[in-house]
């Protein structure tokens, strides 16, 4: 376990927590906290950047889709 919490694993954990913070209020209380999409946009972009370390194409695909989703939500709320 020593050495597991390297930079890309920390970013991955933060990204999953941010996504959960977006999804759970919607599921439980039907509330969207759209500002959290800014965090998920950044963490998803960082995960794609760090994906060269883990070499997981599914991580790249999922986070690319999430960037699209976050971008649409942010634009919808700012325009």
Image (spheres, rainbow, N blue to C red):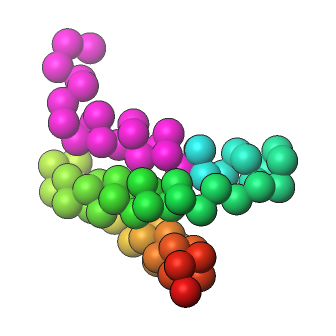
State the residue lying farthest toward the front: 79
Which SS does the magenta portion mostly show?
A: helix
State the residue lying farthest toward the bottom: 79
State the residue lying farthest toward the top: 2
* Vertical placement of residue 1 versus 11, above or below: above
Q: Quadrant of residue 21?
A: top right
Q: Residue at 77%, 55% (x, y): give it.
A: 31
Q: Is residue 66 magenta?
A: no
Q: Residue at 42%, 54% (x, y): give it.
A: 39
Q: Residue at 64%, 56% (x, y): give it.
A: 33
* Vertical placement of residue 49 versus 11, above or below: below
* Vertical placement of residue 79 versus 41, above or below: below
Q: Quadrant of residue 14?
A: top left
- In this rendering, the count of numbered labels is 0
**Going by the image, does 27 lie left or right of 36?**
right
Query: Can I make out residue 45 in this image?
Result: yes
What span is in magenta? 1-20
**Going by the image, does 17 lie left or right of 55?**
right
Query: Can I make out residue 58 in this image?
Result: no
**Going by the image, does 54 lie left or right of 72?**
left
Query: What x and y, as percent, mark residue 34?
Result: 59, 62
Q: Quadrant of residue 57?
A: bottom left
Quarter of the image with the C terminus is bottom right
Q: Is residue 18 magenta?
A: yes
Q: Residue at 52%, 54% (x, y): give it.
A: 36
Query: What x and y, as percent, mark residue 78?
Result: 53, 79
State the residue lying farthest toward the right: 29
**Going by the image, does 37 lie left or right of 43?**
right
Query: What x and y, as percent, mark residue 9?
Result: 28, 36
Quarter of the image with the N terminus is top left
């Amino acid at each position: 376990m020593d050495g597991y919490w390297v930079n890309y694993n920390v970013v991955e954990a933060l990204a999953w927590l941010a996504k959960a913070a977006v999804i759970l209020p919607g599921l439980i209380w039907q509330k969207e906290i759209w500002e959290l999409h800014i965090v998920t946009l950044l963490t998803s972009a960082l995960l794609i950047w760090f994906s060269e370390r883990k070499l997981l194409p599914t991580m790249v695909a999922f986070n690319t889709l999430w960037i699209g989703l976050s971008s649409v939500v942010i634009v919808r709320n700012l325009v």
